[in-house]
Every structure is written in C-alpha cells, then in structure tokens.
Amino acid sequence: MKKIAKIVLILLMLATCIFAVTACDKNQNTKITLSISNENMPQTVFVKGNELDLSAGKLTVSGKEQTEIALNGEGVAVTGYDKNTVGAQTLTVTYQGASMTFDVKVVERIVAGDKFTKEYVTGEQFDTLAGKLVITKDNGESFDIATSDTKLTFSGFDSQTAGVKNVNVTYKDDQVEYVGVVPVTVYEIDRINFNRMHMKTDYKSHDTELDLSSGHFVVTAKGGSIQNKYIYLDDSMVKTDLDTSLVSESNPSAEQIITISFGGREFQHKITITLTDVTRIQNAAKSLAVLDWSGNDGCKVTDEQGKLAVSAYEMYM
C-alpha cells in the first residue's frame, strides 16, 4: 500500500507540473496589440529643431486584458523621429514585442500664409501690406498673422539681384518671441512699362512735395508667375525733389524733369511749376519779418516795404 500511495503522489506531482507548464506556455503565447485612441493621441506637430514630446499620449495595450500606459513610459520604445527634417514622419512604437505606427509632422516655425507675396522682380520693395504668415507654437498649435501687424519685423530682403532670398521674420509680444526664415524669389525683369497717364503734372510754387501716387510700372518677370504686375511708385524710386525755386517774379512758370529709377532703368516725368499769390504772400511775410517792432517809437517802414505789405494784403483779401 505504501508503494502504491507513493506512486499516486508522484503522478499527482507530475500532473501539477504539466498543468503549470501548460498554463505558462498559454500566457507566453497570448498575443498583445497596441493602439492609440483619438482621446489619447500625443502631440503630432513639432517645430523643426524641437525634441519629440509624447508626454500627453497614452498607449492602449490589448491582450487577455486591456490596459493603458504612458506613451513615454517604461518599456515603451518610439523610433523614427528626426527633428531636423521638415515633413511627415512615421514613428514606430514597440512594447513587449508588439508594435504599431503613427504619423507626426515637423514644420518650420514661420511659413508663408494666404496671399503672402513670395515672388518679386529686381528693384521691388518687400511687401508688408498684403498676405499672412503662419506661426507654429511649441505645443504644435498654429495661428495666422497679417504681415502688416506691428508685432512682426522683417530683415534681410534684398531685391537688387535675382535669386532666392531668405527673409528673417521676428514675432514678438509681451510674453513670447518667435524667430523664423521665410524664403522668397526675386526674378529679373523681362518687360517694363512706365504708366504716367494720371500722374500730376501741374504744381504750384507753394507745393512742398511731389505727388506721384498715380504713377506705376507694369512689369513681367523672366520666370515665375509675375505677368503684368502693377508696381506703384514710392519715394525710393524718385531721384529728383520738387524744386520751386525755379520760379520767381521774373520767371513765373518753369518746367522741371523728374527722374524715376526702377529695376536698373531710369524714366523721366516732366512737370510745370507756376508762381502763385500764396508764395508771393509768403515771400512778403519773410521780408517784413525782419522789421524791428521793439522800440517805443514804433517801427520804421520804408516806402518799398509799405508797398509790399499793401500788395500782400490785397492778394490775401
């Protein structure tokens, strides 16, 4: 009987071992799958040069049971991220032999937005009046800002020669500063026409500056998409100042040639300056301003000065 009991005990122990090994094998053969729900998705947009930040993400591990673990937690490996390469990137997540992929995007800090001027011709000024820029924050969120916004400053634009030009852009407010580079292209001029049809040609001697606001160039570039683009005159193009000293009582009307330069070419615009009573009154006032009224005997006025004063009064009235 003792021998039989001993045999039974050995058989029970063997059965227990076999069950344990079988159970262990079943646990080891249980496959797990990985996934990331929309609610647990980490940041997926990163500014070029920034490190990968998965702190907001959670990984769903599904097997016999389903659990959630931090995407940057222990035992989780994430590969495939290159902070210096702009564009879409596919990252691979590995955990306990299982793997999955998800996509992220690396972007420049500041990029051209809607209607931002990306093409110029030689000699053209940088356009800060039209279009928008898109700025991406460190958390991946972006916002649009008009190029005319005072929080923006621009530097580095040079249209004297053709080629790709990098424009340095700085955004600064009370809390943060963002710096980026936006490329634009400058093309050589193929055709240019100076339209002076509606430009002012008649000036008065009391005018203080030229009014060339209606004048513009119509240009077509060698390459790119610039076709018959209107470029209006600005002060940088005008090489001649209004010279009202050309007229006097002996020469009450005079012509002046205004030189305008753009794109390495010069154009001329002829104007006429006419002496006016306003200038005559101003000149009389300057002459009479030298009189000394400080004495107790009054001011001594010559006959010529008296006639000048009367003449100015009559012109004024």
Image (cartoon, rainbow, N blue to C red):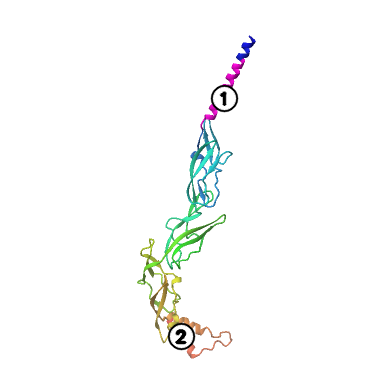
Name the quadrant containing residue 215.
bottom left
Q: Pick whichever, 211 or 7, lies toward us.
A: 7
Q: Dominant secondary structure of the magenta stretch?
A: helix
Name the quadrant containing residue 248.
bottom left
Location of the N terminus by quadrant is top right
Q: What SS does tag 2 mark?
A: helix
Please tell me whether residue 25 belongs to the stretch shown in magenta.
yes
Region rendered in magenta? 9-31
Residue 206 point in image, percent of width and height = 44, 78
Q: Residue at x 53, y 39 (%)?
A: 94
Number of the label disc, if any, that sits on residue 21: 1
Residue 61 point in image, percent of width and height = 52, 35
Residue 187 point in image, percent of width and height = 41, 64
- Residue sitting at the far bottom: 303
Q: What SS does tag 1 mark?
A: helix
Examine the rendering and report whether any part of residue 46 can be seen: yes
Q: Quick one: label 2 or label 1, which is nearer the N terminus?
A: 1
Residue 10 point in image, percent of width and height = 61, 16
Q: Which residue is mark 2?
A: 310
Q: Amino acid at mark 2?
A: Val
Examine the rendering and report whether any part of residue 150 can be seen: no
